[in-house]
Amino acid sequence: MMLEKRVAVVTGASRGIGSAIALGMAQQGADIAVLYSGCAESAEKVCARARETGVRAFSYKCNVADYMMTESTVMRIHNDFGKIDILVNNAGITRDSLVMQMTESDFDEVISVNLKGAFNMIKHTARQFAKQKSGRIINISSVSGMMGNSGQANYSASKAGLIGLTKTVAKEYASRGITCNAIAPGFIATSMTESMPEEARTAAVSLIPQKRMGKPEDIAALAVFLASEQAGYITGEVIKVDGGLYI
Ligand code: NDP
């Protein structure tokens, strides 16, 4: 097993890509902290499925945009599990509209969750990673952050920001045995993309050379690898998982 005796914290793990990452890591032997913002029941279900693999799993309500809450949650996780080895910043939201219609709060909210949320979590875990001279940080960005996307100025800016954050954290912490990488998914079938209008979804799929949306497990497979010992010499990378959407 690739992640035996590791402890992984996954934000936004109550559904979609986050839950697939949490379960993928549990299947490789990692204990899991499942962070969620709203749905305790879904988070508990993910924990129950993780426990079936024989690992420990607990859920924590944590709005990643709230600096103090991320600090206290990281402390609780550390107390419950004794350590943290892997941080996956997956929590994310969309508030799509053209810039002309986008409100200030649409912009601020998306940046606060998607970008500042990752900073908050890194801030509180990296100190301990540095002390233990090891750690894996994986940020879930998006191809929207690399190519831009009409209707997603806030989201694309947050995901591009995550790439800058990833590269900087990789440089600052490389000498302390910590790696930091980003995964940039294309269109993945989750509740986030289900909320798109049918025509927009069909148009999006037609642009993908593989002519299909990805599965959350496609992202989880890479996250598991990046968290493993074998990926120790990979840092500051942004890896697309998009069926060829952005070549
Ligand atoms: P979902 O909408 O299915 O799930 C989002 C998750 O984020 C939920 O677990 C939700 O928790 C959590 N969340 C939302 N707001 C907060 C917050 N303030 N604090 C903590 N957790 C929060 O999204 P996906 O699984 O599709 O996306 C996961 C990540 O992948 C996101 O960062 C997204 O931007 C990125 N991505 C997704 C793509 C796609 O096509 N689906 C493409 C590219 C990137 P709760 O349910 O408890 O509210």
Image (cartoon, rainbow, N blue to C red):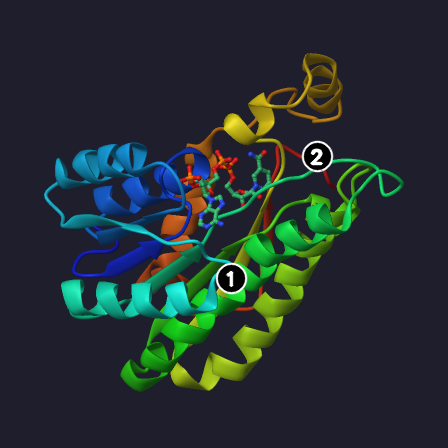
Q: Residues within 10 Å of mark 1 (few under 14, many from 20)?
A: many
Q: Which mark is residue 118?
A: 1
**Residue at (47% x, 62% y) in the render:** 66
Instruction: Identify residue type, mark 2.
Output: Leu
Name the outermost residue toward the right.
100
Name the outermost residue toward the left.
54
**Residue at (70% x, 15% y) in the render:** 202
**Residue at (20% x, 49% y) in the render:** 58
Instruction: Identify residue type, mark 1.
Output: Ala
Q: In the figure, 169 relative to 230: above or below?
A: below
Residue 30 drawn at (x, y percent) = 22, 53
Q: Of label 2 and label 1, which has the lower sequence position? A: 1
Q: Which mark is residue 245?
A: 2
Q: In the image, is 144 to the left or to the right of 87?
A: right
Circle 2: element type? loop
Residue 190 drawn at (x, y percent) = 50, 28
Q: In the figure, 150 relative to 135: above or below?
A: above
**Nearer the observer, 121 or 245:** 121
**Nearer the observer, 6 or 47:** 47
Residue 2 drawn at (x, y percent) = 25, 53
Q: In the image, is 38 to the left or to the right of 246?
A: left
Residue 126 drawn at (x, y percent) = 40, 76
